[in-house]
């Protein structure tokens, strides 16, 4: 049996300019100390300043190769057909900026397909990203309706652990811890 564990961490609290606030830096440092006992094969992070700074701080505690990963980019799944989405969310979806929309979650599906796989050896990777990306991964693992990512809120620098196994369905080990 081989496993893939993905540790998903939302970036630290941002200030008004999109950088980490002092509290966000403290959150990242605490998360890094907490994760320091885990051996990671890689750290993937979004290029946005708040995620990159979080990765740098956590990386000070976690010795693993670290790189910007397009799969971790801040994206909002944007359905072309809203029939499966509760009507209460339709107006909110209309307000999603065009640059953040991921039409029909094509990019997020690709992220799960690329990172949520089991290989010939065990793998443990840290993903530092954004709330909706984490929500999409969790929704996928829970085999929940597509719209459920909307209701999964990840606190800043909280840790969610998802597992893919060669002999079992994907599982959530912890959420928002």
Image: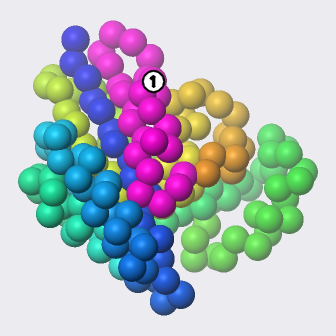
- Whether residue 77 is visible, yes or no, is yes
**Residue at which label 1 appears:** 171
Q: Is residue 61 left or right of residue 137?
A: left
Q: Residues within 10 Å of mark 1 (few under 14, many from 20)?
A: some
Instruction: Say if the magenta span includes residue 173.
Output: yes
Residue 25 figure quarter: bottom left
Residue at (33, 10) in percent of width and height: 167
Tell me the SS state at disc 1: strand
Instruction: Say if the magenta span includes residue 44.
Output: no
Residue at (70, 71) in percent of width and height: 96
- Quadrant into which the C terminus falls: top left
The spot of residue 176 in percent (x, y) is 50, 44
Looking at this view, name the residue that lies furthest to the right: 87
Name above or below for residue 107 compared with residue 172. Answer: below
Q: Nearer the viewer, residue 97 or 48?
A: 48
Q: Is residue 151 left or right of residue 61?
A: right
- Quadrant into which the N terminus falls: top left
Q: Nearer the viewer, residue 137 or 120?
A: 137
Residue at (39, 12) in percent of width and height: 168
Name above or below for residue 42 compared with residue 60. Answer: above
The spot of residue 97 in percent (x, y) is 66, 76
Q: Nearer the viewer, residue 141 or 128?
A: 128
| Residue numbers of the magenta segment | 154-177
- Whether residue 129 is visible, yes or no, is no
The spot of residue 47 in percent (x, y) is 34, 73
């Amino acid at each position: 049996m081989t496993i893939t564990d993905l540790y998903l961490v939302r970036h630290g609290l941002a200030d008004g300019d999109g950088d980490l606030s002092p509290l966000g830096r403290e959150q990242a440092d605490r998360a890094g100390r907490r994760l320091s006992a885990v051996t990671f094969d890689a750290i993937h992070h979004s290029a946005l300043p708040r995620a990159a700074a979080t990765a740098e701080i956590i990386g000070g505690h976690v010795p693993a190769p670290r790189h910007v990963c397009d799969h971790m980019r801040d994206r909002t799944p944007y359905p072309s057909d809203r029939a499966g989405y509760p009507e209460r969310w339709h107006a909110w979806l209309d307000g999603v900026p065009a640059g953040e929309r991921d039409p029909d979650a094509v990019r997020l599906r690709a992220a799960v397909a690329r990172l949520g796989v089991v290989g010939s050896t065990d793998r443990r990777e840290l993903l530092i990203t954004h709330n909706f990306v984490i929500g999409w991964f969790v929704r996928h693992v829970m085999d929940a309706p597509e719209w459920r990512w909307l209701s999964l809120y990840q606190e800043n620098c909280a840790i969610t652990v998802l597992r893919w196994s060669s002999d079992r369905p994907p599982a959530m080990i912890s959420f928002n811890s």
